[in-house]
């Protein structure tokens, strides 16, 4: 019997490549996207169980789960909460509306998907949960306060859930990517232009460098990994007999994971600021 998984945020990038790789490995993949045109494209590509799921719409999430469980006879083997985007901007410049949107997509949607999946996993006494966090889920850097906050929240949620599922046959893992070649920057650029008033900010010069970075083609940071290679690590997390609590992806993630434990805070702060100081300079 095929294993089944629901993956959110499959229009491109890590979610898309993970869906393709699991499908090729024989899984039944419910690859979800926010826009119907992306769902149609995935179905044409062979992901016939692709479906529309907007993680900011709780009713839509519930309907999607009902549809999936009706097709699987009430079972589900795994959930990969991948949907998300990054709102760029200093804490003092992020309006409440932008912050609400960021949390609705990155945290509240994942929380509801996990809550519904847990009902199934508890009945089965088995299940896998994988959540896409970030290097910024444990190493905060400037201009990313909203995004940092959502990823820190996901890390706290998963660490707590790992305790609550101990010994149950349900495994919870975080994947923590650094720079990955995806559509992350174009999506972040759109939200930056929508919500940040550069002309009224004390950070206008820094924002110009951010704009340059967000508009760049190709890799914008050293040690950038392809979404295909990152997806292979996600597949490993979902199929390992004993999955790790965390999967550190890319050299910067590994580096800052250990620096955070070895360095005094003042020195770590300096290195975190330095890591983004020159981004976007030509």
Image (cartoon, helix red, strand yellow):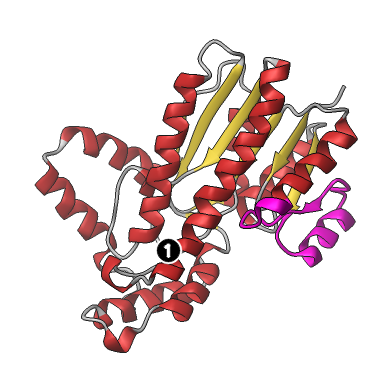
Looking at the picture, tell me which residue is in the foreground, 219 or 205.
205
On the image, which quarter does residue 18 sit in? top right
Residue 48 located within the stretch drawn in magenta: yes
The reply to whether the magenta stretch includes residue 226 is: no
Q: How many marks?
A: 1
Image coordinates for residue 141, horizontal then vertical, percent: 28, 56
Give the secondary structure at mark 1: helix
Which residue is identified by label 1? 99
Residue bounds of the magenta highlight? 33-60
At 21% across and 59% down in the image, what residue appears? 274
Residue at coordinates 49% horizontally, 68% vertically from top-left?
A: 188
Residue lying at 74% horizontally and 35% vertically, measured from the top left? 5
Kindly tell me whether residue 104 is visible in this rendering.
yes
Q: Is residue 138 above or below residue 53?
A: above
Q: Position of residue 72 (x, y in %)?
A: 86, 31
Circle 1 packing at 10 Å, graded few (<14), some (14-19), many (20+), is: some
Quadrant for the N terminus, please.
top right
Left or right: where 25 falls relative to 71:
left
Please indicate whether residue 116 sits to the left or right of residue 181 in the image: right
Image quarter hosting the C terminus: bottom left
Farthest top residue? 167
Q: Residue furthest bottom?
A: 199
Residue at left offset 60%, top offset 42%: 112
Q: Position of residue 51 (x, y in %)?
A: 80, 52
Query: Up-down: is 196 above or below 182?
Result: below
- The percent position of residue 19, horizontal first and vertical second, equals 72, 44
């Amino acid at each position: 019997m095929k294993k089944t998984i629901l993956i959110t945020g499959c229009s491109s990038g890590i979610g898309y490549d993970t869906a393709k790789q699991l499908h090729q490995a024989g899984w039944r993949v419910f690859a979800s996207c926010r826009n119907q045109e992306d769902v149609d494209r995935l179905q044409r590509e062979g992901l016939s169980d692709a479906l529309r799921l907007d993680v900011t719409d709780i009713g839509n999430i519930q309907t999607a789960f009902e549809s999936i469980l009706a097709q699987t006879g009430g079972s589900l083997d795994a959930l990969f909460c991948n949907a998300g985007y990054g709102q760029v901007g200093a804490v003092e410049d992020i309006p409440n509306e932008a912050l609400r949107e960021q949390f609705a997509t990155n945290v509240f949607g994942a929380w509801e998907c996990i809550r519904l999946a847990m009902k199934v996993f508890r009945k089965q006494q088995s299940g896998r949960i994988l959540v896409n966090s970030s290097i910024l889920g444990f190493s905060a850097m400037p201009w990313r306060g909203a995004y940092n906050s959502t990823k820190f929240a996901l890390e706290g949620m998963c660490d707590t859930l790992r305790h609550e599922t101990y010994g149950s046959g349900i495994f919870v893992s975080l994947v923590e990517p650094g720079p990955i070649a995806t559509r992350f920057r174009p999506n972040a650029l759109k939200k930056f232009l929508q919500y940040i008033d550069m002309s009224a900010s004390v950070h206008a010069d820094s924002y110009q460098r951010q704009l340059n970075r967000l508009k760049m083609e190709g890799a914008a940071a050293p040690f950038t990994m392809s979404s295909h290679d990152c997806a292979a690590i996600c597949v490993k997390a979902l199929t390992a007999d004993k999955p790790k609590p965390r999967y550190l992806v890319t050299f910067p993630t590994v580096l800052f994971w250990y620096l955070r434990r070895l360095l005094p805070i003042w020195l770590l702060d300096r290195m975190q600021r330095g890591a983004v100081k020159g981004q976007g300079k030509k």
